[in-house]
Amino acid sequence: MSISTPGGNQRRPDVVSSGKKSGAGKPAGGNQSPASARKSTANRTSSGSAGKKGRKPITPVKVSQGTNWGPIALFAVVGLVAVSIVGYTAFLAFNGSKPWEERAAAIDGISNFRESDPELVAGGNHVTGSVNYTVVPPVAGEHNAAWQNCTGNVYDAPIANEHAVHSLEHGAIWITYRPDLAPEQVAKLQERVVGTEKMMMSPFDGLDSPISLQAWGYQLKLDNADDSRIDDFIRALRVNASIEGPNALCEQGVTATGTAPRNLAGM
């Protein structure tokens, strides 16, 4: 049976045969150009292909991070410093627990006249006038009844040996130096003396070394004020070397300079 349409020879609607796609999805009544049709077909084919095969998985990118050595190095340095401090503190505590005689004996270059000349250091008699000392600067022996003030005194000119020796008997450390010693070297010696009980210093003419330290029965000669043995000598022998006890006076004595001994009333 045939169907005729009014209006003559008009285009019939597309007929979709079984098993073939009809182009569904196109706008109703729309006509596509051959180029647009080909493009649309290609897009559908590509989309269909992607739907069948699926997206290719994206491989995660591994970011290689190097070891951050900064904090590790910092912690290592801090640890070493801490260990050093603890070790040094323990070392000082251990050395401080030793008898002062052992600490003095451990100082390189020290002269111990208590061992080499016991008669010299047995205790000095008080005398008037000048004394001819066999050890220069003197470290013990006869001396004047008046001591030189040794409460952190810095004398800018030579002092009398006879007064200085009496101060040593009271436990003082006497630092002497050549008058031509560089000012910066003298300043470093002064830092160890000023304001410290049982300490005094003065220039000494004819000294055979730039610096010489004296305690009762001990002497240490040095070339430089930066020498750490100066501090070792002071720590070991200041007060400890006294043969009159730690309460022996270092004030109310002679404060004047000059190499001629003086006699103070009441001494």
Image (cartoon, helix red, strand yellow):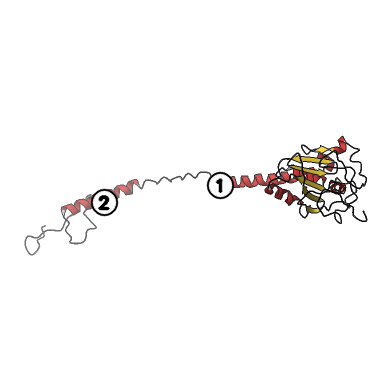
Camera-side residue of 202 and 236: 202
Residue at the spot x=61%, y=47% of the render? 75
**Amino acid type of the residue tagged 1 in the rendering:** Gly
Q: Position of residue 246 (x, y in %)?
A: 87, 50
Would you say residue 16 is visible in this rendering?
A: no
Q: Secondary structure beneath disc 1?
A: helix
The residue to which callout 1 is attached is: 70
The residue that label 2 is drawn on is 44
Q: Real-space Cα distance between discs 2 and 1?
A: 57 Å
The answer to whether 55 appears left or right of 74 in the picture is left
Question: Which of the 4 quarters of the picture holds residue 87?
Answer: top right
Callout 2 amino acid? Arg
Q: Nearer the viewer, mark 2 or mark 1?
A: 1
Tell me the quarter of the picture where residue 88 sits. top right
Q: Percent from the top left, x then y, of residue 249?
A: 87, 53
In this view, 24 is above or below 222: below
Mark 2, secondary structure of its residue: helix
State the image coordinates of residue 169 (x, y, percent, origin top left): 88, 47
User: Residue placed at 26% from the left, 49% from the top?
Assistant: 45
Seen at 19% across and 54% down, the residue is: 36
Q: Nearer the viewer, residue 257 or 9?
A: 257
Report whether residue 36 is seen: yes
Mark 2 surroundings within 10 Å by alpha-carbon count, few (fewer than 14), some (14 through 19), many (20 or more)? few
In the image, taking residue 43 as reference, residue 97 lies left or right, namely right
Quarter of the image where the N terminus is located? bottom left
